[in-house]
Amino acid sequence: MCLDTIQALDCQYPLKLTSITKKTKINCILLKDCLNFLAKQGLVENKTVGKERSVYVITQLGVTLLKEFRDLKETFPDVEARGNENQFTENCQMELPVHRKSKY
């Protein structure tokens, strides 16, 4: 999910949330969470244009990440994505389980 989002932003102009939603086909609420996560990592930026129009752009770090990812895909062409790329962000946002003391 996050990789799709960064790839959608890899263009020459800023995109509104609705444009990213159309390109990635990701639910708007999930996309906002993903964009916030990517912004915290320094891979995308949220900018305000005009009065209150919010747009997103890829940062230089995001461009570098995509380049490295593409280079890895060329180096290892037989390795396919497993379709669980959003598992990474889910695991990062999960709380650690509370361990209870044993009765024994």
Image: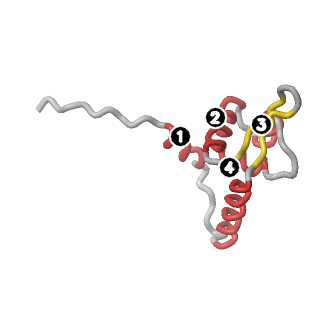
> Mark 4 = which residue?
43
Mark 1 belongs to which amino acid? Answer: Glu
Camera-side mark, 1 or 2: 2
Mark 3 belongs to which amino acid? Answer: Thr
- Distance, label 4 to label 1, CA atoms, is 18 Å
The quarter in which the N terminus is drawn is top right
Residue most toward the left?
104
> Mark 1 = which residue?
90
Figure quadrant of residue 16: top right
Q: Name the residue: 62% across, 57% down.
A: 81
104 horizontally vs 90: left or right: left
> Mark 2 = which residue?
33
Q: Which mark is residue 21?
A: 3
**Contact (CB < 8 A) between labels 1 and 3?**
no
Give percent across and percent down for residue 36. Answer: 65, 37
Give percent across and percent down for residue 5. Answer: 72, 45
10 horizontally vs 85: left or right: right
- Distance, label 1 to label 3, CA atoms, is 19 Å
Give percent across and percent down for residue 50. Answer: 88, 31
Q: Secondary structure at mark 3?
A: helix
Does label 1 or label 2 sit earlier along the sequence? 2
Give percent across and percent down for residue 3. Answer: 67, 50
Camera-side mark, 2 or 4: 4
